[in-house]
């Protein structure tokens, strides 16, 4: 098995005590590569150092919409030179969050668009964080055309999913699939073409049902794989190979095997 966790915050302090052990267990489970998206500029250096140190960790650099109040114009202005110097695999995580109240939407839009332009100019894919704002994000992506990317923890409609797919995006599904009450999400993951899907954990957030109430971990990615395979009535090996290939296609990477 060769799996990619397309969204994992393994750099955060929740993993400081046992990060190496977690990553070792991941590798033994066949999870050889993890995309590590950034959230604020202050953590970029640490995230990049970690990704250089640990094989299989792929950095994305960007400014997360939920932390909009923490991003300065200087952070935004610095992004292109960081990208040129550090060669991240993607720009992220970026997007719009209309779910959390009190996040300035104009400022989110401004920061999102500026980062899309950085991605476009660098020829990089993007890692999207979108809540309750899919139509706004889709309209923006139609104006500022990037190479595609990942719609992380996708939670929109089938019609919105199809628009992302047309724009070169893969849709990320993770731990929520393992909860039987996630009816809408589960039927979406069943209805979408396999070519459009990638797996993610979003660790340490959003855990799987078997580890409810605990820290989420990239080593639970096989739970997400099994849930997706069960839903679709397909062989886990087939789903693993396809989702890995899908992620590689977005990143422009060769297979790890
Ligand atoms: Zn995230």
Image: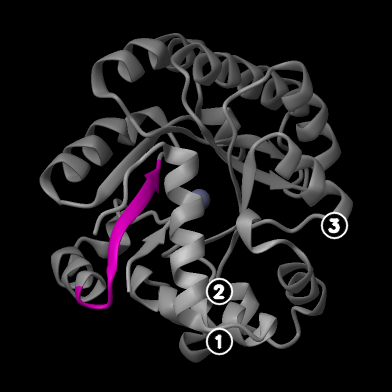
Give residue 213's position: percent from left, percent from top: 50, 83
Left or right of 228? Residue 201 is left
Q: Is 14 located above or below residue 44 in the figure?
A: below
Mark 1 — residue?
209
Left or right of 7? Residue 130 is right
Marks 1 and 3, how far apart at CA:
24 Å
Identify the mark at residue 175; answer none if there is no mark.
Answer: 2
Q: Can residue 168 be found in the magenta stretch?
A: no
Q: Magenta-highlighted stretch: main secondary structure? A: strand
Marks 2 and 3, how far apart at CA:
19 Å
Left or right of 183? Residue 23 is left
Q: What's the colour scheme? A: one colour
Q: Can residue 36 be found in the magenta stretch?
A: yes
Residue 14 sits in quarter? bottom left
Between residues 213 and 141, which one lies in front from this camera angle?
141
In the image, the segment drawn in magenta is 28-37
Ligand 1: does it lie within 8 Å of the C-beta at label 1? no
CB within 8 Å, label 1 to label 2: yes
Q: Earlier in the sequence, mark 2 or mark 3?
A: 3
Identified at 80% across, 55% down, the residue is 156
Mark 3 — residue?
158
Q: Can residue 133 be seen in this view?
A: no
């Amino acid at each position: 098995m060769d799996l990619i966790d397309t969204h994992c915050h393994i750099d955060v302090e929740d993993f400081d005590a046992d990060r190496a052990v977690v990553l070792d267990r991941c590798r033994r489970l066949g999870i050889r590569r993890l995309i590590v998206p950034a959230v604020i500029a202050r953590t970029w250096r640490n995230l990049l150092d970690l990704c250089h140190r640990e094989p299989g960790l792929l950095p994305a650099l960007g400014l997360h919409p939920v932390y909009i109040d923490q991003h300065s114009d200087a952070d935004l202005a610095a992004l292109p030179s960081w990208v040129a110097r550090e060669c991240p695999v993607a720009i992220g995580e970026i997007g719009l969050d209309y779910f959390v109240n009190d996040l300035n939407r104009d400022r989110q839009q401004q920061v999102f668009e500026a980062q899309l332009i950085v991605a476009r100019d660098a020829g990089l894919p993007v890692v999207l964080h979108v809540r309750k704002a899919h139509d706004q994000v889709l309209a923006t992506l139609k104006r500022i055309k990037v190479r595609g990317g990942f719609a992380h923890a996708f939670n929109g409609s089938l019609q919105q999913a199809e628009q992302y797919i047309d724009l070169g995006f893969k849709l990320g599904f993770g731990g929520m699939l393992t909860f039987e009450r996630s009816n809408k999400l589960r039927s979406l993951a069943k209805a979408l073409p396999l070519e459009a899907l990638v797996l993610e954990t979003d660790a340490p957030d959003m855990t799987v049902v078997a580890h409810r109430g605990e820290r989420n971990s990239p080593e639970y990615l096989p739970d997400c794989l099994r849930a997706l395979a069960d839903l679709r009535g397909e062989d886990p090996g087939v789903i693993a190979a396809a989702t890995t290939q899908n992620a590689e296609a977005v990143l422009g990477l060769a297979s790890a095997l």
